[in-house]
Image (tube, grey):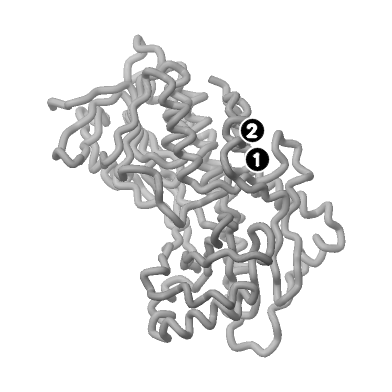
Amino acid sequence: MNPSLSTRCCIVGGGPAGMMLGLLLARAGVDVIVLEKHGDFLRDFRGDTVHPSTLDVMGDLGLLDAFLARPHDKAHRLRATISGQQIGLADFSRLRTRCKFIAMVPQWEFLDFLRDEAERYPGFRLLLDTEGTGLVERDGRVVGVEVQTAGGASQIAADLVVAADGRRSVLRDAAGLTVRDIGAPIDVLWMRLPKRPGDPEGSGGYIDTGHFMATIDRNSYWQCAYVIAKGGISAIQARGLDAFRAEIAATVPPLADRVDHISSWDDVKLLSVTVDRLVQWWKPGLLCIGDAAHAMSPVGGVGINLAVQDAVATANLLGKALADRAMGAEAITPLLARVQQRREFPAKVTQAVQVAVQNRLLRPVLQSTGRSQPFSVPWVLRMAQRFPILQGIPAYAVGVGVRPERVMT
């Protein structure tokens, strides 16, 4: 093997998990390369939520004030309109965290910020337009990454490769790791609609018989997520664009006057929802984190949060060993299992809750099409309206989660 580059750690994927881990390892004195297959981070229809536990991580790094100086919105509460009735879902003001809100920030802004901070450290390199296409193995150990750039194919040698390349991870497939498909009964259609004076404030959701739409406030426009039954896109398209616009207008009456901005199916992007988890997250020389290890449902918008927590745990457990150049690659292998031991339980619990919400709320909503009665507010939400203190429970589950990580390196 004649690699053009070599590094102590090569992270494949410049999403929240990859960029946060790159920053943390560079800060710990590790020589690290992050590969991003695109030329920048500017892609729409990605998660926009930076949760209180992630904001605590930014505080640990001394970066919270600088991050919050960038444009963002604060979601102190989550609300939904169910059959025309305003319902409080979660109240983050009850949390015992540095920030008692979710910061609504376009994901590219978050990633740009992490890149800018990571580039302050001499050991950090970000290679854009560089796609990890496979693994280089020797004697049963991963020793590098096969990459594709505009200049052609090459290899990068590394003592550790971290696959953070998302739910369709090329590297986890190349490694032959076993994936457990947990299943999801939904898909999501993403679109954008313009925002106008007098629109409702903040992000929210709209639920009615047969329909569920989440609306994310992007200041000048609404990023909309319309939940459909798994595999239902063909039937929706067969009914025609006019019928689809009418569906959106009926689901979100405040935005009904602008659904004509959906001018073609090119304006509607399908997210095929997957919930799965690796049986083993690692093999010698390779570690999978974030969606590459456990693809999350969009329920609760917690995918970014879990990815960041994985990165923090990885840096806490591996940072010192990777910074010690005297420690060989073989000695790092036992630490990979410790990352999975640390992060597998939070992933399992979060996915179990997401599946419960999918099966007990979203599936019944979608299956209620054609009923004459409006969709009724679930009893647990009625209780949360009567006793608002209960809204702190979903706020903790969404905003903090199971086993939040703090920066130790």
Q: Amino acid at mark 2?
A: Asp
Q: Amino acid at mark 1?
A: Pro
Tell me, yes or no, whether the two marked residues, 2 and 1, touch with CB atoms within 8 Å: yes
Q: Which residue is mark 1?
A: 52
Residue 312's disc number: none
Q: Observer-nearest residue: 255 or 5?
A: 255
Rendering coords of residue 339 (x, y %) = 48, 32
Q: Observer-nearest residue: 13 or 262?
A: 262
Q: Which residue is mark 2?
A: 56
Q: Please, which residue is most extreme toward the top here?
A: 326
User: Residue at horizontal 46%, vertical 39%?
Assistant: 111
Rendering coords of residue 223 (x, y %) = 53, 61
Q: How many marks?
A: 2
Position of 198 compared to 152: left or right? right
Q: Please, which residue is most extreme toward the right here?
A: 386
Other residues around mark 2 within 10 Å, as few (<14) / some (14–19) / many (≥20): many
- Secondary structure under badge 1? helix
